Image: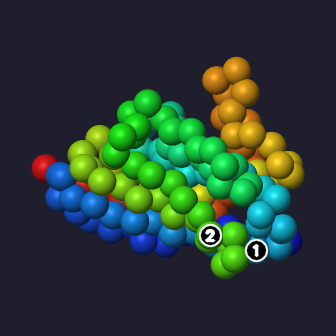
């Protein structure tokens, strides 16, 4: 059974930084791409960042490019999302996702394929102005 668990959500002020963590178990971690998604109340789910299984490449949503960074350590089954220069519009529930397929790239034709993977329960990030 695959389990994905996020942590690190908090309330911060505009311009602040936060690092989210995610661990995944029940799968061969270094065979699966990992991603972060977010969803704010009344808004559609949004792909934030995704990194391939060995960390060879990463993709980001347009709204977070240059401010957020995803990285992973396969030795301890952990992926992080470093969020800098936070804005109120970054306020959302953040979810970590493990791809169901092995060694598959995160996106295809603009679509976040990993969205059909294993999802965690989410961690809340609130950015106040």
Residues 94 and 85: in front is 85
| 59 displayed left or right of 76 | left
Is residue 121 in sight in this rendering?
A: no
Q: Residues within 10 Å of mark 1 (few under 14, many from 20)?
A: some
Task: Give the residue displayed 66% in from the left and 49% down from the top.
Answer: 56
> Split into 4 quadrants, where in the image is the N terminus?
bottom right
User: Is the residue 89 above or below the residue 17 in the image?
Assistant: above
Secondary structure of residue under mark 1: strand
Secondary structure of residue under mark 2: strand
Name the N-terminal-most of marks 2 and 1: 1
Q: Residues within 10 Å of mark 2 (few under 14, many from 20)?
A: some
| Location of residue 14 in the rendering, given as x and y in whole percent from the top left corner | 17, 52
Task: Give the residue displayed 86% in from the left and 52% down from the top.
Answer: 102
* Residue that label 1 marks: 25
Task: Give the residue displayed 45% in from the left and 65% down from the top.
Answer: 20
Tally the marks: 2
Residue sitting farthest toward the front: 56
Residue sitting farthest toward the bottom: 76
User: Is the residue 56 above or below the residue 89 in the image?
Assistant: below
Q: Which mark is residue 98?
A: none
| Location of residue 19 in the rendering, given as x and y in whole percent from the top left corner | 40, 65
Q: Quadrant of residue 111?
A: top right
Q: Which mark is residue 73?
A: 2
Is residue 9 in sight in this rendering?
A: yes
User: Is the residue 97 above or below the residue 60 in the image?
Assistant: below
| Location of residue 58 in the rendering, given as x and y in whole percent from the top left corner | 59, 44
Q: Nearer the viewer, mark 2 or mark 1?
A: 2
| Location of residue 59 in the rendering, given as x and y in whole percent from the top left corner | 57, 39
| 27 displayed left or right of 43 | right
Compute the Cα span from label 2 to label 1.
Answer: 13 Å
């Amino acid at each position: 059974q695959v389990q994905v668990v996020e942590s690190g959500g908090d309330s911060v002020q505009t311009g602040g930084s936060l690092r989210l963590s995610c661990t995944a178990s029940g799968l061969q971690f270094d065979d699966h791409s990992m991603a972060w998604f977010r969803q704010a109340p009344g808004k559609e789910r949004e792909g934030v960042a995704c990194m391939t299984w060995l960390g060879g490449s990463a993709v980001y949503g347009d709204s977070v490019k240059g401010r957020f960074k995803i990285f992973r350590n396969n030795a301890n089954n952990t992926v992080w999302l470093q969020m800098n220069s936070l804005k109120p519009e970054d306020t959302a529930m953040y979810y970590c996702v493990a791809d169901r397929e092995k060694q598959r790239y995160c996106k295809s034709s603009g679509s976040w394929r990993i969205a059909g993977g294993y999802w965690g329960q989410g961690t809340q990030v609130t950015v106040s102005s």
